[in-house]
Image (cartoon, rainbow, N blue to C red):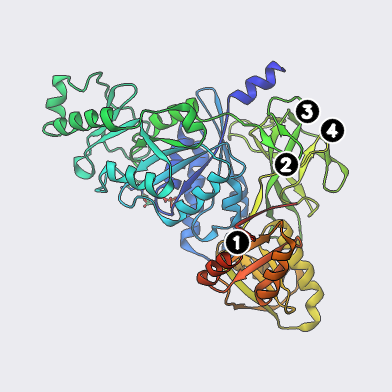
Amino acid sequence: MNKELKREVDKRRTFGIISHPDAGKTTLTEKLLLYGGAIQMAGSVKSRKAARHATSDWMAMEQERGISVTSSVMKFEYNGYEINLLDTPGHQDFSEDTYRVLTAVDSGLLVIDVAKGVETQTLKLMDVCRLRNTPILTFINKLDREGLDPFAVMADIEERLKIECAPLTWPIGMGSNFKGTWNLYKNELHLFSAVHGGKRQKGDVFKDPNDPRLDEILGEQVHQLREELELLQGAGNPFNLERYRKGEQTPVFFGSAINNFGVQEMLDSFVELAPPPQPRPTTTRDVSPYEDDFSGVVFKIQANMDKNHRDRIAFMRICSGKFTRGMKVKHHRVGKDFTIANATIFMAQDRTGVEEAYPGDIIGIHNHGTIKIGDTFTDKEPLKFVGIPSFSPEHFRRVQLRDPMKRKQLQKGLEQLAEEGAVQLFRPIANSDYILGAVGLLQFDVIVHRLLHEYAVNALYEPVSVTTARWIHSEDKRALDDFSDYYRSDLAIDAEDCLAYLAPNPWKLESAIERFPKIVFSTTREIS
Ligand code: GDP
């Protein structure tokens, strides 16, 4: 095995944050970047978010594109590790991209607001992680505020996210009584003090929970701590690396992102425990990151909104081998050679002129629409990576052209936007409508804007009585025919000619599933 490659792979950690809006993702990201020395970047995360809060106007967001490309991948170095933090957009620009980014990471960091417990968006994002049993580390945030009992938060995670919790730190009080955390595997106390301005913070260290000095510092609360530690020792789940790596157990940390408390402890454990780049499946075999031959897969496309430059950036995760700028690779879907000259290599701010990248790293390739989501590039072997799916949309609109003469443009525009992964396109079998599907509502604003400016299509986007979609398969041709006859008016073909059932409501979907047990209803579809 190539020693240099092995060293580079082993020190990489590529992850995404899973959280519900307002749990503290942005705040925590800033603190993490601070540890990586990318302070400039930390500022830009905040200003990007501030600008976004100020307006939900798409045009304004367009102006932020420059920032949003660079903050899609935040790369930093910490303790000798090369960390790629992939942004999982939330809030208004929550879209299918948010889901798809999670298929390109090796692990996830779950952020939970201690006052709220598990929230809806967290549930959805965890479903995506479960597709690949992605290991998840948990940070329970905002301990400086009153919240739920820590045992209750863990029970909530276990019950609703179906993952066992193994606390590695334990909070002492919360809100105005928050005194700090006890590190369960190092047996150390970290005393809390609120800091402002995001300075690094390390608590005082005590080695024994029975240390009499703790009685003085913690007062009455020391009894509760000792009791809880005993309880955890008896009834808690001991941390098990293997189970974490299989996605069955999540190590849990408590802290306060805004006070930068508990963040470094979590980060120190994260780099040690989280897996380095993992092998990835293709249609023919698993590809190990340690293989010398280069391979990569595209998981996200970002369009440049300037209509004069219809260029796009394809985000490629390197899966094996070493990338060097200007290298020639094969673009397998189109069967052509491709020289990756015009690539953005995402790196920490202070290192410019980087010409190489390794498995786990993300590169951005400029192109004019030749690259699609799911495309595989290698230097020799024809491969096709799998596991970068389309996700069942949750919002739907019917497109009504204002000018019927523009039908061709509409078709072309929608097909291209669907290829890019910006929206999903369904053509009902029973009529000639165009139905758009999206995971987040803002996706429609983007589509309207782009169809108008890039394809000169002026259209109306009407609500339609579809609440969810499922892709349909069956081994049994007869069952498929019967199903198709029965539900003809609710069936559609998507942009890749796959059959989908557009359910008018959840009850109808349930009854369809009951009525046709031989039909498989999928919430995801592999991109071919
Ligand atoms: P995001 O929507 O998940 O990115 O969340 P933000 O990082 O923007 O945080 C949402 C709100 O919670 C902001 O007002 C933050 O200042 C606040 N916040 C974040 N972390 C903490 C914390 O540890 N304690 C308290 N009290 N507030 C926090």
- Identity of the amino acid at label 4? Lys
Q: Tell me which label, 4 or 3, sits earlier in the chain.
A: 3
Instruction: Answer above or below: position of 243 versus 89.
Output: above
Q: Position of residue 277 (x, y in %)?
A: 61, 31
Whole-Å distance between the Cαs marked 1 and 3?
44 Å
Q: Tell me which label, 1 or 3, sits earlier in the chain.
A: 3
Q: Tell me which label, 4 or 2, sits earlier in the chain.
A: 4
Q: Residues within 10 Å of mark 1 (few under 14, many from 20)?
A: few
Q: Tell me which label, 1 or 4, sits earlier in the chain.
A: 4
- Identity of the amino acid at label 3? Asp
Q: What label does residue 385 carry, if any?
A: 2
Q: What label does residue 293 carry, if any?
A: 3
Contact, CB < 8 Å: mark 4 with mark 3? yes
Disc 2 is placed on an element classified as loop
Q: Position of residue 140 (x, y in %)?
A: 36, 42
Disc 4 is placed on an element classified as loop
Q: Residues within 10 Å of mark 4 (few under 14, many from 20)?
A: few
Residue hosting label 1: 517
- Identity of the amino acid at label 1? Pro
Residue 493 appears in the figure: yes
- Identity of the amino acid at label 2? Phe
Q: Residues within 10 Å of mark 3 (few under 14, many from 20)?
A: some
Q: Is mark 4 within 8 Å of ligand 1?
A: no
Whole-Å distance between the Cαs marked 3 and 2?
15 Å
Q: 400 or 328, which is in the foreground?
A: 400
